[in-house]
Amino acid sequence: MKKFIFVILIFAGFNSVLAQKSGYGIGIMLGEQTGLSGKYWLNSENSLTGGLAWSFGENEAIYIHSNYVWHDNNLIKMQNGSLPVYYGVGVSLGFAEKSRINIRIPLGVNYQFPTNPIDIFVEIVPQLGIVPSSSFGVGGAIGIRYFFQ
C-alpha cells in the first residue's frame, strides 16, 4: 500500500498540469467500502464517480457503485490547491448470498493539488437499502486518485 502511494506521488511530481477538474481519475478508497475508485469530470462542477469495492460490514459483499456529484468550489477557500465540498446521489449493487440495491447520498470534501494531477477525498455516505428489503446504513471512505487527461 505504501509503495503504491509512493509510486503515484513520484509519478505525479513529473506532471505539472492541474488535471483534477477534467479527464478521468483512478485510485483507491479505504473504509466501508474498500477498493477501487474512479471519477470522470463532466465539467468543472459536475462529475460521475464510481467504485468496485468489498464491504467488511454486516452485509459482506462485493459492491459496484456509481454517483452523480455536484462540487461547490467556493465554500472553502484555500491558498494552495482547492477543497471543494461535494454532494450527490447514486446507486450501489451488492453481490452476495442475498444481492442488495441501495440508494447512496455521498457527502464529502476533495483536496485538489495545485500542480499535480492527484486528489484526496474524504466522504460519508448515507445509504437506503431498497432490495431485498428496506434498510438504512452509513458508509464512508478516504481515498486518493490520479488523473489522466
Image: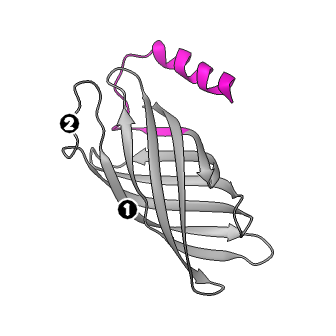
Residue type, numbered disc 2: Lys
> Badge 1: how crowded within 10 Å, few (<14), some, or many (20+)?
some
Q: Which residue is mark 2?
A: 77
The numbered dot on residue 88 is: 1
Per the image, label 1 sits on a secondary structure element best described as strand
Q: Residue at x 62, y 55 (%)?
A: 33
Residue type, numbered disc 1: Gly
The numbered dot on residue 50 is: none
Which region shows up in magenta?
Answer: 1-26
In this picture, residue 105 sits left or right of residue 131: left
In this picture, residue 75 sits left or right of residue 92: left
First along the sequence among labels 1 and 2: 2
Q: Position of residue 105 (x, y in %)?
A: 43, 66
Question: Looking at the picture, does residue 83 appear above or below residue 102?
Answer: above
Answer with the quarter of the image where residue 18 lies: top left
Q: Are marks 1 and 2 in contact (CB under 8 Å)?
A: no
Q: Is residue 50 magenta?
A: no
**Spatial distance from mark 1 to mark 2, Cα to Cα?**
21 Å
Per the image, label 2 sits on a secondary structure element best described as loop
